Amino acid sequence: MTPPTTVMSSASIDRLARSLRASTFDQVQRALSAEGASRGDLDPVMSPDGLRVGMDLVPVADVAASVDRLGRRYLYRVFTPHERACARIGPRGDAVLSTESSDVLPVDLGGRAGDGMSALYSMQSLAGRFAAKEAAVKVLRPRGARPEWRSIEVRRAVGGWCELRLSGLAARLADEAGLTALAVSVTHEPMMAAACVVAMSKGGATVWHQTPSPERKGM
């Protein structure tokens, strides 16, 4: 059976054409804004009020490989003294894993004063903190230069939960984005570590594309 033919008036056709043009224009504007954000020569997109969420998943073996290859240089570049203490095994550290575990690696500290010659660290703990830093960067949405890793610190409270402390460029990005509060949750298993960061935003901030992490590329 042949379907009935719909006949549109010229006025209806004109309205439809205007609607399509407007829709196409909006799509082009959004695309141009995103492109301009990456080049810095067009109007940026403005974020609405609400939440920003960043998540990251890190293979523990990747962090272990970086520690094994770079040792103290990697630890001191990426993690703060508090984070290293939380991941350290033994009487001067907080981690409570068996030193027989494959999760634990010794790190040559190069005879740094007060540290001794070497220390044992939990790779799961370090991977969880690295995931939290990456998740925080996704919330901060930097344009161009990324915050220095130690400017995003995962602080473990006395009760056992974690909190984020920002400084330097990370703190400035949060202020510019209108972020009023950040919360972090970290978890890890023998093979993987994950973290989620949620931030409250006052809105009106610039949304930029994220620059890939050179540390993640090198893992």
Image (cartoon, rainbow, N blue to C red):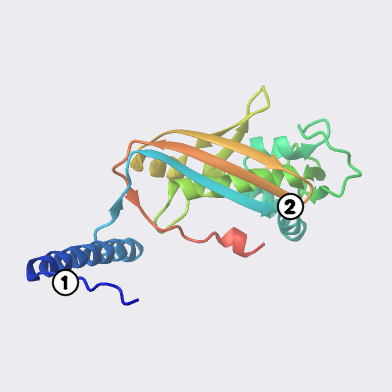
> In the image, what residue type sits under mark 1?
Val
Residue 109 vs residue 82, the one in the foreground = 82
- Which amino acid does the dot numbered 2 rest on? Val
Query: Looking at this view, is 102 or 196 the one in front?
Result: 196
Left or right of residue 172, residue 15 in this image: left
Residue found farthest to the front:
1
**As drawn, which residue projects farthest toward the right?**
100
Direction from residue 122 to residue 79 in the image, left or right: left
Q: Characterize the local packing of mark 1: few (<14), some (14-19) or many (20 or more) Cα atoms within 10 angstroms.
A: few
Secondary structure, mark 2, is helix
Q: Is residue 148 visible?
A: yes
Q: Nearer the viewer, residue 74 or 171?
A: 171
Residue 144 percent coordinates (x, y): 41, 59
Separation of marks 1 and 2 at Cα, in angstroms:
64 Å
157 w.r.t. 90: above or below? above
N-term mark: 1 or 2 = 1
Q: Residue at x 35, y 76 (%)?
A: 1
Above or below, comparing residue 210 to residue 24 in the picture = above
- Locate residue 187, reporting x and y percent: 68, 40
Circle 2 residues within 10 Å: few <14, some 14–19, many ≥20: many
Q: Nearer the viewer, mark 1 or mark 2?
A: 1
Q: Residue drawn 64% across and 43% down?
A: 129
Q: Which residue is mark 2?
A: 60
Quadrant of the rendered image containing residue 23: bottom left
Position of 201 with respect to 121 (left or right) is left
Q: Which residue is mark 1?
A: 7
The structure residue drawn at horizontal position 16% and vertical position 72%, both measured from the top left corner, is 7
